[in-house]
Amino acid sequence: MPEHLVDPDVPRDLHAFIAGLPKAELHVHHVGSASPRIVSELAARHPDSKVPTDPEALVDYFQFTDFAHFIDVYLSVVDLIRTPEDVRLLTYEVARDMARQQVRYAELTITPFSSTRRGIDEGAFMDAIEDARKAAEAEFGTVLRWCFDIPGEAGLESAEETTRLATDDRVRPEGLVSFGLGGPEIGVGRPQFKPYFDQAIAAGLHSVPHAGETTGPQTVWDALTHLRAERIGHGTSSAQDPKLLAHLAEHRIPLEVCPTSNIATRAVRTLDEHPLKEFTRAGVLVTINSDDPPMFGTDLNNEYAVAARLLGLDERGLAELAKNGVDSSFLDAPGKARIRDEIDTYAAAWLSS
Ligand SMILES: Nc1ncnc2c1ncn2[C@@H]1O[C@H](CCC(=O)c2cccc(C(=O)O)c2)[C@@H](O)[C@H]1O
Ligand SMILES: [Zn+2]
């Protein structure tokens, strides 16, 4: 593990336990998962870009003054992905990084609109991700599924296009399981996306919008009411509304919590102010995720270490947290049972050694 990711407040032993713990990741962005090596490789291929080619310089480049700055930088990395081969390489390498962290199953959020509008052919794009998905499963044993998200700030044209790509049987990829909405929330109300989510849900997709990351709890209510959200991306500001917390707990709507992301984008001031503990205290089902790990200088294992510290968890608690991820996923029942068993077997062996 990189030394900067060893939380001194978490015992070394617990870090080691997390590193080997089988996990599911439910909230992680495709382009946002590009490792510094991949980003610098792509930046070198496309020297007209403002993205640094030196991995050291990337660390500074990935320091964000606020959420809008983060999205600017994010889009400069999106600009580096220009060919179906870039897409395939990125997807395959992301799966390799996941496998190293014992991620058995991941729902990867992809924004196909951003690629098709930049000129990548839609059929070639779908072939590239599917090809990488199959290779990753065969070679690394990591099962990937897709969430296609609308980049809300790009307007209803992006909603229209994303919905078409997600629902047209001639283009939608086999691995697609869910439909999302990302990007800035301020000035991008959730209700306007209802018709698109209705279509996606009618086509069999699960609804997983981002909400309450950079705006208040009303956005989470809107995602539940208008977009029929089955899980909430972040949902951070839900902590401000006890009725909402009770609703999420009662209806077992999981939150996809990404603690380090919230600090890096300055959605939350410090980790100690992060509401994760308030969520669990209110009985809300939480899952732990990494969002855009290299951009936020983190990885999924580190997010589990952060959660262990914020929630005061030991090995048993961490195993339960990993099972929350599995239970909240859109994997089929036998697949869920298999990973749950693996977690139990791993934890039992660890605790008896
Ligand atoms: N923490 C996050 N919270 C929210 N979203 C996050 C997070 N991390 C990553 N994203 C991704 O950022 C994209 C934003 C893309 C976007 O806004 C945009 C606007 C105008 C034009 C274009 C374009 O492509 O031309 C794109 C989202 O779709 C989402 O997948
Ligand atoms: Zn996200």
Image: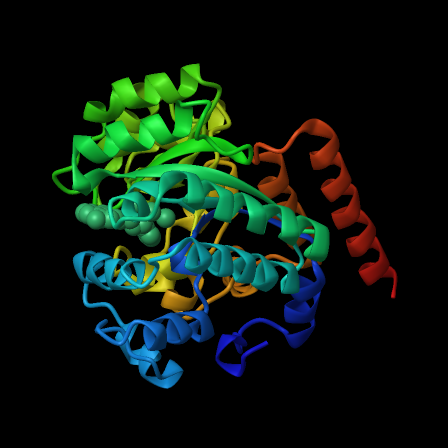
Residue at image coords 40%, 45%? 110
Q: Quadrant of residue 191?
A: top left
- Whether residue 310 is visible to the viewer of this picture, yes or no, is no
Q: Residue at x 48, y 80 (%)?
A: 4
Residue shown at 55% from the left, 57% from the top: 92
Q: Which residue is at 37% across, 31% downward?
A: 165
Q: Position of residue 269 (x, y in %)?
A: 27, 62
Between 129 and 318, the residue placed more toward the observer is: 129
Q: Is residue 224 above or below residue 25?
A: above
The answer to which quarter of the image holds residue 272 is: bottom left
Q: Is residue 254 above or below residue 63?
A: above
Apparent side of residue 142 relative to residue 279 in the rendered image (left or right): right
Left or right relative to 168: residue 104: right
Image position of 234 (left or right of 191): right
Residue 146 x %, y %: 49, 40
Q: Nearer the viewer, residue 198 or 175?
A: 175
Residue at the far top in the pictured view: 202
Which quarter of the rendered picture does the C terminus lie within? bottom right
